[in-house]
Amino acid sequence: MEIRIGKQDGKTAVLISFDTDAEKFESAYERNKFFNELHGRKQVIIKENKRYEYRREGLLDEVPHLKVANSVFIIMQEHMRMMQEFFGEWEDKVMFRSFPVLLSPSEFKEMEQNSEGKEVDIE
């Protein structure tokens, strides 16, 4: 992502940054539950010498977003309430902040087209 100065013709989105406090989680299982609920996970089951893989969806599978870093992503403003509710459930263990950001029309369109919630990295 580049920083642009001057007249902007982009659209406003929301950058979300979060940090977990590992000491406040009761166990590694609970911390993993947070990440699985947010990002989803791949489940692998091996039964009778056969391998079955399943995708267990997380919240970000439903929300179009642009990945900035491991704990930083950008969403459209319309999905902010959903994110606030999710992070509100974890507020004693996870600190999150949100910032309005201006995306170029092409970045915003890329995120809108990401209707399946698939992760799109910003270069």
Image (cartoon, rainbow, N blue to C red):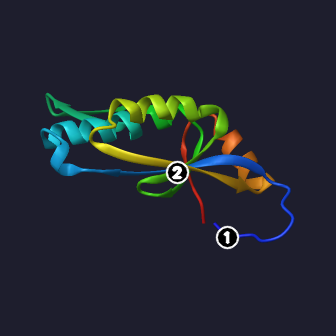
Query: What kind of element bears circle 1?
Result: loop
Residue 110, which numbered label? none
Question: In the figure, residue 116 lies in which quadrant?
Answer: top right
60 left or right of 120?
left
Give the answer, above or below, for where 82 lies relative to 76: above
Question: Residue under circle 1?
Answer: 2
- Amino acid type, label 1: Glu
Residue type of the residue flagged with mark 2: Phe
Mark 1 Cα shell of 10 Å, populated few (<14), some (14-19), many (≥20): few
Residue at the far front: name it: 92
**Is 49 above or below relative to 121?**
above
The quadrant in which residue 77 appears is top right
Q: In the drawing, does residue 35 fall left or right of residue 100?
A: left
According to the picture, the residue beneath numbered tag 2 turns out to be 73
- Say whether residue 116 is visible: no
| Residue 3 placement (x, y as % from top left) | 69, 70
Residue 37 sits in quarter: top left
Quadrant holding the N terminus: bottom right
